[in-house]
Amino acid sequence: MTKFFSIVPSERRPIYVLNDITVVRLPLGEHEPVKEVKKKMPVAEGTLLATHSSPNVGELHSPLYGAVKEVSSTYIEIEGTMSRPAEGSVAPPEPADLGTPPDRESLCRLMKSLGIAVRPFTRPCELFIINGLNPEPGMLHTQELLREYVDVLNAGVSLARRLNGGSAKFVLALPEGSTASLEGVESRHFKPKYPISLARPLISTMTGKESSAGVTLVRLHNIFTLGLTAGTGLPLTRTVLTVQGNNFHTPVGALIKDLFTAARTHPAPGDSIVLGGAMRGRAVATVELGIGKDDEALMLLRKGESAGLKDNPCIGCGACVHICPMRLRPNMLSRYAEYEQYDSCRKEHIDTCVECGMCGYVCPAQRPMQQYFRMAKLNLGITSRQQQMAKPK
């Protein structure tokens, strides 16, 4: 059985720009539509559609010229054209002058208004790591960004330094053999075997320390989207992701079905649609959903390709313990989570779990390990908030 997976593709996977997307559904999450947004309202590329109460979450903007087709509790649908405004279209926003803000706080507010989640860039740190490894199997765009969009990435690095505001050392993590580089950033190379590409394993390997104190890690994808905005002064309306082995530069909100069409593939009965990589992605029920800013992969698990998960009892073989990169006991964690013994999960250091999926992959009993852990973390978070609310003020 394979214990580790290569995260470097065997051949080039160029990034194709999709300019023929004419319908998008932007997922709202916890964003609230602005009061002006109503059905049939004309929009331009970059029109503000929804805001978020957190200062660390970027706003949502239209990636199309056209009109609002639907405003629901979960998405805003826009129908129109990609970048060819029709006669009489509303005017797009003016580019922001990113050199104007006199201080970092003002720059952060401006970037939020342009759709950028600034929190990853503003944490005080001594070491700022840019993860130039493909995050996990099924995501293939990272090395292509370093080949095809180096100017955008350099613009992103420059803006990241301003947002960081300190004297942090910037380091780019790359797979062995890569000759890629970014301006003013030290390159370090690693064996491209998953799960080294996840945050905690990569930080630990790079620093030789278990603690991530004083270290910030961002994905190259974050630097790319920052660079798109830095280069234009316009709101973030596009992203890059891998779709069934193909890399696309696409509008945010593009429908899953249209992305599969662009990749010349379609789900068949019994297939599973996964938003994210093969190890950590989440299954979605319909191709009518739109992708978000942070989505990096979309794939199909064909019927019969995987063994599937079952609520079988743990057989105590220890395979999951042997494979865990964080040196946890997934066998015990999954048992505690299965029977809702969440305090015991905490004692087993579930907060250290990176949800890499390796334990579930090697489990001969096919237990839904990752699902148990996510359920436990969710419940521990709810419990924690309830305890905070119950404390006397």
Image (spheres, rainbow, N blue to C red):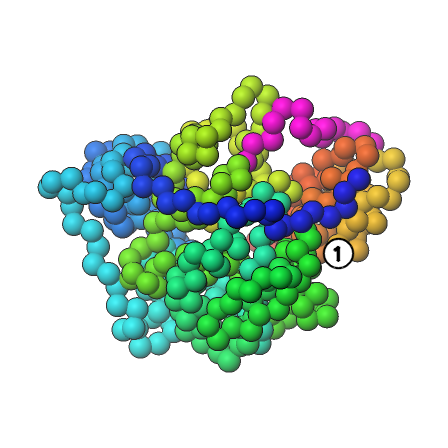
- Relative placement, left or right, of 138 versus 231 is right
281 relative to 116, above or below:
above
- Relative placement, left or right, of 100 versus 267 is left
Q: Which residue does the image show at 36% across and 58% down from the upper left?
A: 228
Looking at the rendered image, the quarter that the N terminus falls into is top right
**x, y (%) of residue 33?**
32, 44
Looking at the image, which residue sits at the far front? 11
60 relative to 87, above or below:
below
The quarter of the picture where residue 299 lies is top right
**Pointer 1: what residue?**
326
Q: Which residue does the image show at 31% across and 77% down from the upper left?
A: 102
Question: Can residue 391 be seen?
Answer: no
Looking at the image, which residue sits at the far top? 269
**x, y (%) of residue 368?**
72, 35
Q: Which residue does the image show at 54% across and 21% down from the upper left?
A: 268
Looking at the image, which residue sits at the far bottom? 167
- Specify start and end residues of the magenta stretch as a single range: 299-313
